Image (cartoon, rainbow, N blue to C red):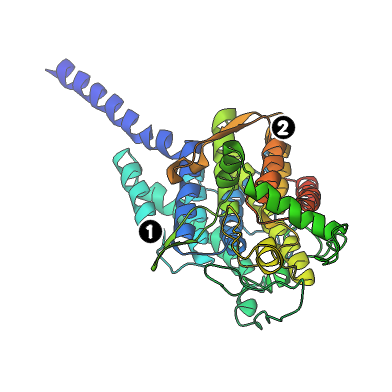
Amino acid sequence: MKKTLLGLAVVLCIFSCKNSDEYKTFLHNPDLFSATVHELNSVVMGNNFPPMVASRNYAYAAIAAYEVVAAAYPDQYQSLGGQLNGLKPIHAPALTPEVDVELASLMAYMKVGESVTFPEGSMQVYADSIMKVARKKGLTDKIEKASRLFADSIGREIVRWSKQDNYLETRGAEKYTVKDIPGRWVPTPPMYASAAEPHWMEIRTMVIDSAGIFDPAPPPAFNITDKNSKYYREVMAIKNAGDSLTPEQKHIAEFWDDNPFKMNVTGHVMFGSKKFSPAGHWMSVVGIAAQKAKSDYATTVCATAKTAIALFDAFIQCWYVKYKHNTVRPETVINKYIDINWRPYLQTPAFPEYTCGHSTISSSAAEALTSVFGDNFAYTDSTELEFGINSRSFKSFRHAADENNWARFYGGLHYHNSCIISTDIGQKVGQLVATRLKMKK
């Protein structure tokens, strides 16, 4: 009898011990972190935030997750405190054995991600679903509580820092004034929406010294009467391209459209459709790359944070240029001077043409990703599958950014000159971020 009871006790112990660690397999999987980034992407999309505002959520959330990792593994990762503009050294609490670092990192990401812009609780259902699974797999109340306290301590510092970036002040700033001046931006169909975020260049940057650190030459002078002028040639190039797009060119344009809110008009019926924003698209690419590289949890978080920061600063730089020149969109020019019925393949966003936001932020993200995963990192981007758009494969992140360059031209949104210059500027922003930030030791 004693042997039987002893044997049963051993079996129960083995079973319970196995179950008690099962939660680690679930929580420590880097794919779970990437799935959480996707969830924040979905929440951003659901709230109709414009691309540059979306980048703010991604950046602060990813930094919070990264700071948990850096505090837990100081011999491998360096805190961004003292490296990012205005972020003082992080005072992380003591790391006790009860703290599950990966769980704390997830908690910090979700909490800060919703706290930056959304109403509190925007990610609560998703967070609850994670915790429910983890508890079933053996997560104890003691570990959960310790991990939450650790995450909240760091998260509070990141949220406090985020509130000093001038975002709230720009909410009540003066609106863009529409003026009937040749060459100046005006609202475009079908929504004729007001200019989006005309004060975004006033947001505090994270790594670059200022919004105007990379200030390109002005766009070609508006001249639609001289057929030999550079401006006229740019206008005709985009019109002619739009009139004869191949199926491949249409796919490229659609793949990189990333319009967070497209207004569809059919007769008298109008309805909106949503997709991930440009920043959200690149956040997805981080997860795809991390999975292909078989990156561990910490590396995945690090790559997400570095890319998010590069996107954030690139938007600020680009918006500085956009509202410095207030350049009219091709659609407006072609409709007024050449063909009143012409429409671009993609729907024109509500902000000035020069420079191209998507080209700028894409090349910036590509540099950040290259610094983590290396050049010539081939991958297939399946981000758009959930929106009914087939995947595309690339030889490298820079290859993807170059294709995006053409996508905005094929879509009829930007002159190719703008895309070329934007790609160059975005690369400079991304390279500066990748060079200045000291993250993995």
The image shows a total of numbered marks equal to 2
Q: Amino acid at mark 2?
A: Gly
Of residues 210 and 133, the one nearer the viewer is 210
Q: Nearer the viewer, mark 2 or mark 1?
A: 2
**Residue 77 on image: x %, y %:** 67, 43
**Residue 241 on image: x %, y %:** 68, 47
Distance from the alpha carbon under mark 2 to that under mark 1: 36 Å
Of residues 249 and 257, the one nearer the viewer is 249
Q: Is residue 437 left or right of residue 377?
A: right
**Residue 94 on image: x %, y %:** 57, 52
Residue 79 in view of the camera: no
Q: Which mark is residue 414?
A: none
Name the residue that disc number 2 marks: 374
Q: Residues within 10 Å of mark 1 (few under 14, many from 20)?
A: few
Q: Is residue 31 left or right of residue 160?
A: left
Of residues 248 and 315, the one nearer the viewer is 248
Report the quarter where the N terminus lies.
Answer: top left
Q: Going by the picture, which residue comes out furthest to the left?
A: 1
* Image vertical order of residue 29 relative to residue 127, above or below: above
Name the residue that disc number 1 marks: 124
Q: Amino acid at mark 1?
A: Gln
* Image vertical order of residue 334 relative to residue 99, above or below: below
**Residue 176 on image: x %, y %:** 67, 79
Q: Earlier in the sequence, mark 2 or mark 1?
A: 1
* Image vertical order of residue 298 relative to residue 187, above or below: above
- Name the residue rendered at 62%, 70% in the picture: 196
| Secondary element at tag 2 | loop
